[in-house]
Amino acid sequence: MSSIASFRYRVVDVFTSCSLEGNALAVFPDASGMDGAIMQKIARELNLAETVFVYPAGRQNCAARLRIFTPGKELMFAGHPTVGTSWVLIEEGLVPRDSEHFILEEGVGPVPVWIERGEGPKIWFRTPPISEGKRYEPSICAQLLGLDPTDLLDVAPQFLSAGNPTVLVGLRSKDAVDRAWINSQGMKTLRGEDREPFCVFVFTPTDEGAYSRMFAPEYGVPEDPATGSSTGPLAAFMMRHRLVSGTAGTRFISEQGTKMGRRSILHVKILGDQGSEGINVGGYVTPIAEGVMTLGSRFAKRETA
């Protein structure tokens, strides 16, 4: 019996049409034979914001099941893995190349995906239901982000989640966004007695929509170049505080990752008044690399979860 187990993977840049920009993602199109512990080790080895492992769907109406890992933990949902994996599934022929719509199974449940055809396919997903949590003292957030209280908008930072817990902090300028930073200790201080780690998403309104950054050091991601799972909550937060139009059919973009040299463009589409029929987030995908990971046989354990 062979002592080697090999797994093929692809690397794509998500939310960009330019190579080596956007948010890099590794996708294993066939993860059969891996268990969760090995997936976590592989994600840590590759050290990208997220790595996706694809399985046959457990739900009858879903095209595939996704397990998503940062270098530090498994996520129940994430945006750029949904967009990037959808592109890989199409390229691999795991869903028909002419598909206009399919559903992916993730930890939060079914996630609908749509393909908008053009020079390159723009891939959209429907943001899962958004839950709201507590509001935070602006002066404390400013201090932990290394900012002056006057850098913050006159809107209380708030916890929202569409499967990925996020504290949204509105700032007055791109300069303030670029100066912001928070480390693991700052995250723990902001989190207080809350047990579940979360990310901190800072943004400022722009003519095009928003200019943004996201920090998640407790996930093993000091800064994320593009955060699709936080962009739906961003849209909801901005609509509520009249920082962007909430009219049905409104489209805008969130520019993220520019400060770290990984400019990403996340497209947002508002469905129904104030997003009453949903919030779609989408973008383009650029292929970068293909590879094979070779592991000893003791790592090839049948996935049972």
Image (cartoon, helix red, strand yellow):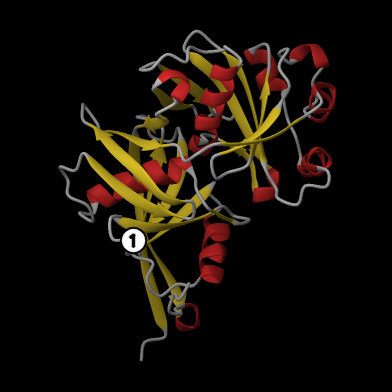
Q: Counting other residues with Cα less than 10 Å from the Cα at mark 1, is it few (<14), some (14-19), or many (20 or more)?
A: some
> Is 263 or 54 nearer to us in this picture?
54
Judge whether 46 appears above or below 7 on screen.
above
> Residue at coordinates 60% horizontally, 28% vertically from top-left?
213
> Residue at coordinates 35% horizontally, 29% vertically from top-left?
17
Residue 140's x, y, as percent?
84, 27
Name the amino acid, label 1. Arg
In the image: residue 188, left or right of residue 55: right
Task: Specify the quadrant that holds the N terminus.
Answer: bottom left
Residue 163's x, y, as percent?
55, 45
Element under disc 1: loop
Judge whether 176 appears above or below 302 on screen.
above
In the image: residue 277, left or right of residue 298: left
Question: Which residue is the extreme one toward the top?
Answer: 207
Question: Which residue is the extreme one toward the bottom?
Answer: 1
Corner quadrant of residue 250: top left
In the image: residue 153, left or right of residue 223: right
Badge count: 1
> Is 95 or 157 nearer to us in this picture?
157
> Residue at coordinates 36% horizontally, 87% vertically from top-left?
2
Q: Which residue is label 1 attached to?
A: 59
> Residue at coordinates 31% horizontally, 48% vertically from top-left?
103
Judge whether 255 appears above or below 223 on screen.
above
Corner quadrant of residue 243: top right
Q: Can residue 204 be seen in this view?
A: yes
In the image: residue 105, left or right of residue 246: left
Corner quadrant of residue 116: top left
Residue 118's x, y, as percent?
21, 27
Q: Can residue 258 be seen in this view?
A: no
